[in-house]
Amino acid sequence: MAQLKAVIFDVDGTLAETERDGHRVAFNLAFADAGLDWNWDEALYGQLLAVTGGKERIKYFLADFNTAFKHDDIDSFIVQLHASKTSHYISLLADKSICLRPGVVRLLDAIRQSGLRLAIATTTTPANVTALISSTLGADALDWFECIAAGDIVPAKKPAPDIFNYCLNQLNLSADECLVFEDSENGLISSCKASIATIVTLNDYTKDDDFTGALSVLTQLGDEDSVATVVAGEKITGDYVTVDDLIRIHARG
């Protein structure tokens, strides 16, 4: 295994619990604005998360859960509906309704101090990434990440490997020089197809996913007052994930 040079983070569910209390809420607000009686409760949204990408998730909902709905120009309708949802999501972030998960700020700071490079690879839109980072870490923090690969920048979203391959190309690094943080089975499949070693941090929606292939599966990154528990794979040396843990786990991958 080559020396670790960069750490790549997924966003939704990994950096923050955005799905349940952010994206889901924003979708429902967009539906109400459009005069639709749709409501994605927590259970339904958990099923819809089988598909990555907001526009793709709406298409999945209409194809499998709401087949009676018809529209003369369904593609344009979905694009407009998703744009409204994005606007509501950004407003939620501006209101500080969504916080980063335990340990994220601490580990990002430690990674930067160590000299390792940072990147983001996600299916969410660039606007969503910018809003989340700016509202939680400050606008200057966007410069921490040498590559922010997001949204429709590649033709196929996770579980396809395209977004990670794009990120590697932008970083000018090989797969074995990087480590990924993901939170979902689709994300893990994507990073594994790109041959990048991956650590998973669980959330309520993904705790029952199949994480075969992950180097380590943890409840969270952890802080001094919020312990990270290893569910499977490589152990960490203390109560929370450190840069030394990342280097050691990556070397064993």
Image (tube, rainbow, N blue to C red):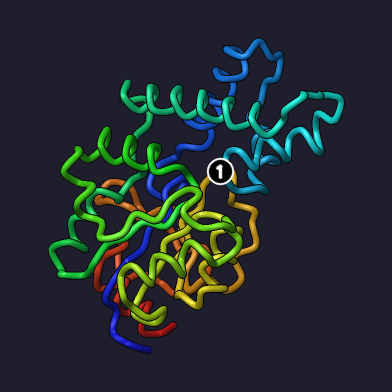
Say which quadrant the C terminus sits in.
Answer: bottom left
* Residue lying furthest right: 68
- Work out whether 2 lies above or below 213: below
**Callout 1 secondary element:** loop
Q: Which one is in front, 154 or 193?
A: 154
Tell me what residue is drawn at x 50 percent, y 54 percent: 183
Q: Where, by quadrant of the figure, is residue 92 drawn?
A: top left
Is residue 240 shown to the viewer in this render?
no
Q: Is residue 157 left or right of residue 170?
A: right
Q: Which one is in front, 95 or 127?
A: 127
Tell me what residue is drawn at x 38 percent, y 72 percent: 169
Q: Which one is in front, 32 or 238?
A: 32
- Residue 143 coordinates in the image, percent (x, y): 19, 51
Tell me what residue is drawn at x 37 percent, y 77 percent: 249
- Residue 45 coordinates in the image, percent (x, y): 65, 35
Say which quadrant the N terminus sits in.
Answer: bottom left
Check disc 1 and give the amino acid type. Asp
Q: Is residue 11 left or right of residue 78?
A: left
- Work out whether 170 lies above or below 151: below
- Work out whether 198 lies above or below 77: below
Is residue 146 shown to the viewer in this render?
yes
- Number of numbered discs: 1
- Residue 75 coordinates in the image, percent (x, y): 68, 34
- Work out whether 146 lies above or below 165: above
- Residue 247 coordinates in the image, percent (x, y): 29, 77
Residue hosting label 1: 204
What crowding class fits label 1: few (fewer than 14 Cα within 10 Å), some (14-19), or many (20 or more)?
A: few
* Residue lying furthest bottom: 1
